[in-house]
Image (cartoon, grey):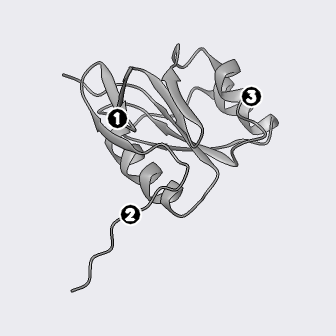
Amino acid sequence: MLLNEIEYADAQPIESYGADFFRIAGEKVSAPAIVHAEGAYHWAGLDDAEAILALKDRVDFILLGTGDQLMHAPAALRATLEAAGIGVEVMKTDSACRTYNVLVSEGRRVAAVLLPMAG
């Protein structure tokens, strides 16, 4: 079997996470967090649509990681993002982290918007 190492080019891979942090490209970022090809930073949470809207011209969609439990995106947040042309895919945070890494390794224009996992 031939295994290939994943290359991220200019993207920021998610390396690990804990109850109150994400390790992204070797740097620890407090949870919740936003991660995209150009950087990663703390996010104020589901009431902070503005931080996601700031990515409008850099991403085609976001992966919304909802923590340990899958839940719906708040209707107002989803409506605001979709009105701005940003698609929303909702999944548990661990799945969002894995999916984000695969997509950015393919050069996709995506961001991960992540709520923390339980400790």
Q: Quick one: SS at disc 1?
A: loop
Q: Quick one: SS at disc 2?
A: loop
Of the image marks 1 and 2, the number of the one nearer the N terminus: 2
Residue farthest to the bottom?
1
Q: Judge whether 89 appears above or below 51 on screen.
A: below
Q: What residue type is labelled 3?
A: Thr
> In this figure, which residue is indicated by the disc labeled 1?
26
Of the image marks 2 and 3, the number of the one nearer the N terminus: 2
Q: What residue type is labelled 2?
A: Ile
* Quadrant including the N terminus: bottom left
Please provide percent x and percent y for residue 66: 41, 32
User: Left or right of 118: which side holds 12?
Assistant: right
Please provide percent x and percent y for residue 24: 39, 35
Q: Residue 80 carries which label?
A: 3
Q: How many neighbours does mark 3 have within 10 angstroms: few (below 14), some (14-19), or many (20 or more)?
A: some
- The CA span between labels 2 and 3 is 34 Å
Q: Judge whether 31 appears above or below 97 on screen.
A: above
Give residue 36's quadrant in the image: top right
* Residue occupying image coordinates x 40% and y 38%: 25
User: Left or right of 89: which side holds 77?
Assistant: right
Of the image marks 1 and 3, the number of the one nearer the N terminus: 1
Q: Which amino acid does label 1 sit on?
A: Gly
Q: Residue 45 carries which label?
A: none
Q: Which mark is residue 6?
A: 2
- The CA span between labels 1 and 2 is 16 Å
